Structures are given as C-alpha cells and as structure tokens.
Image: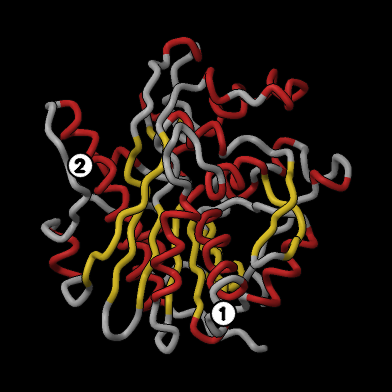
C-alpha cells in the first residue's frame, strides 16, 4: 500500500490539538493548587473555540502521577545507575534528588478524543508527571502483543504506560477500547502526540488497524519530537500496517534520538531501536545570550516552556516549524 502524502494543513491542525492537551494538563494543575476540581473540559479554551469549533470533545484519557522512587522496576537494577542521569538530561527541571518527589497517586489528564463529521482526532501530550518521565527513559524491551499476535518488541516504559493497570486505575488501552470500537470506520482517524505522546500515538494507530479492523486508508499518525519505541521487527510490522505515518523532527531535539544517544541501539537484539513512518525534519536551536555569550538550551529544542509560559500556548518549536513550512522530507 502506498502512503498518502504528508499534509501540512492537517499537521498544523494536529500540532494545535497537542497544544490543547498540554493546556488541559496545566489547567488541571492550576486547579489542584487552588483546591478546585477540573473535569478536563477544553471546549472553552480560546484555541479550541478558534480552531476546533466543529469538533466535539468526547472523552478524556488519564495518566498516572506517582513519585520516582516507587516506579523503579527492580528487574532492571543494572540500568538504575544511569536512569536518573538520563532523566536529568532529558528533563532538567527535575529535582536533583529523587527523594524530593512527593508520593502522588492521582491521575492526570493525558489527552482526549475529538469527533467531527469529517474526521476523528486522538491526541496525547508529552511527559509531565514523574511517572511519565520515568517510563520514557526505561529502554529494555518487552514483547508487544496486539490483536492476539506478537508484533516485535517495544520499550518497557511504553508498554507499561499503555497496557498496564496500575494503582487500581484503568490502563490507557482499556480507557480507549470502547471508544475505538465505536469509531466511524468510514472517515479518517488522526492519531497524534508530542514527545512520549508520540509513542502512545504509534501504539494507538496500530491498534486501530490490528485490533479494531479500521482500514489503513483511514488511519493517519502524526507525531512531533517522538523517539523510536520498538525493534526493527516492530518497525517493519508497523510500517506495513500503518503506512500513513509521519514524524516531524527538530534535528537539534534530543528526544527523537533517544535511546540511541545513550548507546542503546546496539546492545543485543532486544535493545535495537528503529523509527517508524516518514521523517520530516527542520533545524531549530534555542539559545540565551547572557553577556553576549550564547548558551545552548537543549530542553527548549524539544518544548519551549518559556514561550508557553509567556502566554503563547503552542508546542514550539514544532508549531512554528509547521506553520512556517520549515519541515522537509528526510526520506527523499
């Protein structure tokens, strides 16, 4: 099956949907601090009203929020010495000491499903909670089973985030199952995410085809700043099942190079990672200039929270790159 062309108009829509997912998370966080409840409604956000008014918010998805210490899997003791260093590199805003985390067992909003007459959109934000940060840096692989069939190996952290029921909470897979069964199979379904949300988008897109029998012609996966999640067997299987898959990558972003940047591409058969889909790349580096000396800020090449906190609620630098048509096919 031949893949459809990368669609910039759709890509611009989807990266803004991811922005809404981040806004949803931060709205919940601000409400929690003031002791208020938040039901996950995004329909009153200005971005939703201006861009997504024809859509209905059908369902919210929830993640886990727990402390770092309780999330260490003892079966991976040989990796624990490096895990926290990896996390600190990827997420420099983390505490210097893991013990500084407080135990939190509530769920956080991770994304949502939007429906319209023309198409449906499944959206996931990137890592924010300690639990999510932990899972995004667990690289050992486990078998991936979808639709009753093993389809290669994927990162243990991705598998746990998607498939496991933890703390008596419903897994993401089980949260979505009744919704995916009822989706209109005759219109396109776009699955999207940023950062670790891109990994969840990959698994969800494959589930739509493999488990819920949606035609590959109607399944489209766009992710932004996502890392490789599986071995070459998984990547080959995925590409055959979901050919309409596109990864938008900032070449200066650390996340798309995880786990290869830590030397884990070639450590035995279960530590080989391979990207899926078509790559569309651009180059953007974030600097500050104290006393006219440039200082590189690698985390802002992935998600520029400075711009976000200044009232620019978009997922930059990815949103700006798509809007300005800076991304180009790397596979040509």
Q: Secondary structure at mark 2?
A: helix
Q: Which mark is residue 27?
A: 2
The x and y percentages for residue 128 are 40, 37
Q: Give the quarter of the image for residue 13.
A: bottom left
Q: Which mark is residue 263?
A: none
Local crowd at mark 1 within 10 Å, few (<14), some, or many (≥20)?
A: some
Q: Secondary structure at mark 1?
A: loop
Closest to the camera, between mark 1 and mark 2, is 1
The figure's colour scheme reads secondary structure
The x and y percentages for residue 82 are 68, 23
- Distance from label 1 to label 2 (Cα)? 35 Å
Figure quadrant of the N terminus? bottom right
Local crowd at mark 2 within 10 Å, few (<14), some, or many (≥20)?
A: some
The foreground one among 74 and 10 is 74
Q: Give the quarter of the image for residue 150.
A: bottom right
Does residue 318 sit above or below 104 in this rendering?
below
In percent of the image, x 40 and y 86: which residue is there?
Answer: 187
Figure quadrant of the C terminus? bottom right
The x and y percentages for residue 112 are 33, 58
In percent of the image, x 22 and y 39: which residue is there?
Answer: 28
Q: Which residue is mark 1?
A: 213
């Amino acid at each position: 099956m031949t893949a459809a062309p990368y669609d910039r108009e759709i890509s611009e829509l989807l990266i803004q949907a991811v922005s809404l997912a981040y806004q949803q998370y931060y709205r919940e966080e601000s409400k929690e601090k003031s002791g208020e409840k938040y039901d996950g409604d995004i329909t009153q956000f200005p971005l939703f009203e201006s861009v997504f008014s024809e859509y209905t918010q059908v369902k919210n998805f929830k993640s886990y929020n727990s402390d770092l210490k309780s999330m260490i899997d003892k079966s991976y003791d040989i990796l624990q010495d490096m895990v926290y260093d990896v996390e600190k590199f990827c997420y420099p805003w983390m505490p210097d000491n893991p013990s500084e985390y407080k135990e939190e067992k509530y769920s956080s909003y991770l994304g949502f499903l939007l429906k319209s007459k023309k198409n449906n959109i499944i959206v996931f934000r990137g890592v924010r909670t300690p639990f999510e940060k932990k899972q995004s840096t667990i690289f050992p692989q486990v078998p991936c089973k979808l639709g009753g069939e093993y389809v290669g190996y994927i990162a243990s952290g991705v598998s746990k985030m998607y498939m496991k029921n933890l703390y008596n909470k419903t897994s993401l897979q089980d949260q979505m199952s009744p919704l995916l069964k009822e989706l209109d199979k005759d219109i396109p379904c776009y699955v999207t995410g940023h950062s670790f949300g891109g990994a969840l988008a990959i698994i969800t897109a494959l589930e739509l085809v493999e488990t819920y029998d949606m035609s590959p012609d109607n399944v489209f996966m766009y992710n932004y700043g996502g890392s490789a999640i599986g071995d070459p067997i998984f990547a080959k299987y995925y590409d055959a099942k979901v050919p309409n898959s596109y990864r938008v990558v900032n070449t200066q972003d650390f996340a798309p190079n995880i786990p290869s940047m830590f030397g884990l591409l070639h450590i035995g058969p279960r530590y080989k990672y391979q990207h899926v889909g078509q790559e569309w790349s651009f180059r953007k580096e974030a600097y500050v200039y104290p006393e006219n000396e440039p200082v590189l800020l690698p985390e802002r090449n992935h998600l520029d929270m400075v711009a976000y906190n200044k009232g620019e609620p978009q997922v930059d630098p990815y949103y700006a790159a798509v809007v300005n048509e800076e991304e180009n096919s790397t596979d040509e």
